[in-house]
Amino acid sequence: MINRFIPRDISWLSFNDRVLQEAADASVPLSERIKFLGIFSNNLDEFFRVRVAGLKRALAFNEKQAKEIFFEKPQIILDQINDIVIQQQQQFDHIWLKVQAEMAKERVFIKTDEELNKEQQQFVKFYYEEEVESNVIPLMLDDARTMPYLRDKSLYLGIAMRKKDWEYETRFAIIENPTRRNGRFLLLPSPEGEKHVILLEDVIKFNIPYIFSYFGFDSFKAHAFKITRDAEFDLDNDINTTLVEKIEKGIKNRRKGKPTRFVFDKDMDSSLVAFLIKKLNLSKKDSIIPGQKIHNFKHFMDFPKIFESEKQSKVRSSFVHPDFAGRQRISDVVVKKDVLLSFPYHTFHPVIDLLREAAMDPEVRSIYITIYRMAENSKIANALINAARNGKDVTIMLELRARFDEEHNIIWKERFEMEGVKVLLGIPEKKVHAKLCVIKKRLNNKTIQYGFVSTGNFNEKTAKIYGDYCLMTSNRTVMADINRIFSGLRKYKEDLSQVFKACKNLLVCPTNMRSTFLILIDKEIAEARAGNKARIIVKINSLSDKQLINKIYEAAAQGVKIEMIVRGIYCAVNQKNFANPLHAISIVDEYLEHARVVYFYAGGKELVYISSADWMPRNLDFRVEAAVQITNKKIKQELIAMLEIQLKDNVKARLLNNKLDNTYVQNDKPPQRSQFELYKYLRKKTK
């Protein structure tokens, strides 16, 4: 019997395996392969911090209830996770060895503390004394001492020390790797034609005899390890505290999260391993993983750009949308026509420039915008602050609960409020994830409104690597809907469903997005039953919503042609009764596919929506999300054309099948790498 659903967490591991495939692909530039290894590692850390932690808490649930939520019993999933992660870690280690061999061909070498020549030894000693020593705090360990708190984003050196005249006793210590202050990579003096790099932990290891010189130890064994903690916290336990206080308390409580994974150098002193396992209160049910020498590989996403063969090419750099070419103001264009920006192919500058123009325009009265994640030194934020300084009414719906960005957003909240910006803090129990902006200006006794609806964050950094769409528009119906949403956010204690239902062009979660899509799928089913053409295309990051999956199953059974482009989680399974099997692919390439687009043939009318929401219960039921119907015929056809390009990918597309084997799409057609083809398609429109 075929299962009706793939457990979400098992599907996610399959996605991370696709990331690992990119690291293994010899056709991918070496620096990109190293970056993909870093992405794989960072993804896995977050997975253990959130999903594995959640599964372990779910062990206390009613078994039937837990199986309904997770699509399988939590313990069965946890057992599968352990098996898959160990297998993937072995693949990772094998790929890293191959990458290092390729690096050697480029004359780039990562040196350990034991491989330094005399000049490098002097360099490392001096660097440690001048730059690192003040950031190193050795902590002695023994049974009599309380185990110091270990942070789950940090890398540690576990040190076992002995003296010659000690027959049995070994002393233990740990040192946190100060990568936040010193970085992870240090370029060494190198022979001509070569580049040598040393990791910060090896800088510290080389200096360990100096660090512990006061104790008279004769031998030292130092090996890296890290832990991953439960990162979840409940925001709604204490109704007597403000949301900001809850967030701040939750961030602090992450320090208390139970370890969910312990990864260590397999060559670490066995008595130290046993000591750490005991002190961390780990058991056989926890993920205790002996690994290779290097851990916290996420830092390798920022490996130094030192490969001579990979000089930065400008052939595929972002370009200006043709509607914004020339010297005209962005707002002048948007007031006259809809414009669709496709990141990272189109530059993000028009979004920033639109807000900068609004900040300086004496006719602009107000700016309303939602913010979920911002760049570190956000130009978006600076433009909004400048608008407030210039006397504009600036209102920001700032989502403080953007996971792992909570602290960053709290800092921005304080800055915004200091500058006179009004900050809304969302709705209890629901994150605001919609990507919306409306700007109002008064001109010739008329109110003019314009703005944008996006599939991704207003973040100039991620816009360079995330594939997203942003509709810039002055459509009156869309602007009216955005105003309704902001009205609801300001008065969330009222019945939001009534406010959101009044929207005419936007579909809004948690009110009517799922129900509208279910109705539209039903209409395709009716067309198929009548013998007419019926087609649905869904491009999203994740698919795990049972109601929508079951409706897709019903459509497939009736012969509706269903094609899906799903980057990450995919819980659907092809069933034997499908008259038209689901065709689902995942594209993992240079850019992260992040846009959400939904297409219905609709008897030839061809309805197209772009959205901030994935098809997951968390998005559809527990977030405020927005999807906008594309009514501009030219833009609609452009989006359909881009979907068709991606569906034809036979280079970077993998089949999402029941086996979860990530088989590459193979056919007898000419190679088509969709991200390259999208670039060419959009670039051609500028000429």
Image: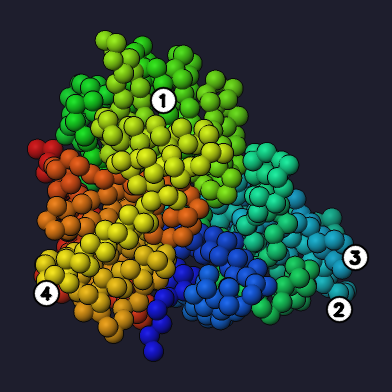
Residue drawn at x 28%, y 34% is 477
Residue furthest right as drawn: 144
What residue is rendered at 13% in x and 38% in y? Answer: 686
In the rendered image, residue 353, in percent from the top left (x then y), is placed at: 33, 26
Q: Nearer the viewer, residue 677 or 34?
A: 677
Which mark lies nearer to you, 1 or 2?
A: 1
Q: Secondary structure at mark 4?
A: loop
Marker disc for residue 367: 1
Query: Three-letter amino acid code at disc 3?
Result: Ala
Q: Residue at x 20, y 42 (%)?
A: 631
Mark 1–mark 3 Cα distance, whole angstroms, equals 59 Å
The amino acid type of the residue labelled 4 equals Asp
Is the residue marked by circle 1 packed among few (<14), some (14-19), or many (20+) residues within 10 Å? Answer: many
Of the numbered discs 2 and 3, the one sitting upstream in the chain is 3
The residue to which callout 3 is attached is 144
Of 309 and 452, nearer the camera is 452
Amino acid carrying mark 1 in the image = Ile
| SS class, disc 1 | strand
Q: Nearer the viewer, mark 1 or mark 4?
A: 1
Q: Which mark is residue 410?
A: none
Q: Which mark is residue 668?
A: 4
Alpha carbon of mark 2 to alpha carbon of mark 3: how far?
18 Å
Three-letter amino acid code at the position of disc 2? Tyr
